[in-house]
Image (tube, rainbow, N blue to C red):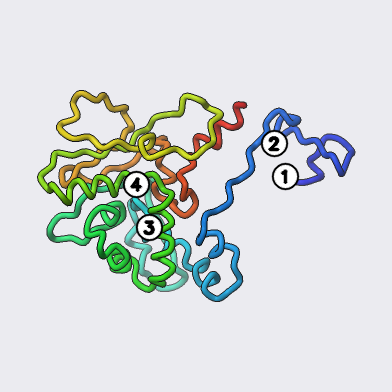
Amino acid sequence: MWLDERINKSVKLPVFSTCCARGKVILPFLQELPSPLNTLLTGTDPRSCTFRQNIRMYNSALSFTSIGAKIDQQITGTSGIYTFRIHGEMYHRIGSLLPNSETQPQFAQIYIYDTDHEIQNRLNIMPGLDPMILGELQQMLHDINPYVNQFRQAGNLLKHNPSLDLKLVITNNRTKDPRRYNTPNASEVAAIMIGNGQEIEHQNRDIVLQPHEGNIKRISELHCAYTPLHYVLMFPRVIMMKQMKNMLLQ
């Protein structure tokens, strides 16, 4: 906000109406970014500068979802200034839990499949990144991201029993308290189901993933996980966008 937007004359104690309803809306302080992300975003050393120049590539290497769009191939690859044009809208999508025998693991699959070579699997998809930086960011997500927790649990179950009838459901539940701002735990963002799961009634927008079955799924932009599943470096602790918006209802 700008100081000139105040509705009183005081510079020391300005009052604003557009953004915060004359003080009725009180937003919480932003959480401090976890290490090493905070250092990489604020540091002035060459390593941090290189990270910021390639931050989108690092995010893509760690993301659970990919971006889909209908690309205009008549424009892509032509001479002149680089132009990327699509028809319709861009969207996020996610595949099965495990890759088939002919493809490398990608996106969310990397958190589950061949985890002994997790860094190398990411570098296979996004070459040119610093393995040390990528490893530090990956460990950060392992430590604090509840989606990583659930995907790794599913991976451990499938590793010990490849024929297990398992589903991972990324839920679209809304918190009971709209003012809640704390980080959700793993059981609140996803559930692992053994068996056919017919006794569980899914919401329309729940994302149901199986080891091999099913095509690539398009994620509804209304799903509360739409943003944190893709922008993992922006929401490493999975503070849902809906929770940010609901703070305005206090």
In percent of width and height, residue 88 lies at 38, 46
User: Which residue is label 4 attached to?
Assistant: 149
Q: Quadrant of residue 80?
A: bottom left
Q: Are marks 2 and 1 in contact (CB under 8 Å)?
A: yes
Q: CA distance from mark 4 to mark 3?
A: 14 Å
Q: Upstream in the sequence, badge 4 or badge 1?
A: 1
Q: Categorize mark 2 by other alpha carbons within 10 Å: few (<14), some (14-19), many (20+).
A: few
Give the residue displayed 26% in from the left and 59% down from the top.
Answer: 115
Q: Quadrant of residue 147?
A: top left
- Seen as rendered, the residue at the extreme right is 9
**Camera-side residue: 131 or 209?**
131
Discs 2/3, front: 3
At label 2, the amino acid type is Cys
- Residue 87: % across, % down: 37, 50
Secondary element under disc 1, as helix, strand or loop, is loop
Q: Earlier in the sequence, mark 2 or mark 3?
A: 2
Q: 50 or 40: nearer the eye?
A: 40
Q: Which residue is mark 2?
A: 19
Left or right of 220 on screen, residue 110: left
Residue carrying label 3: 62
Residue at image position (34%, 67%) is: 126
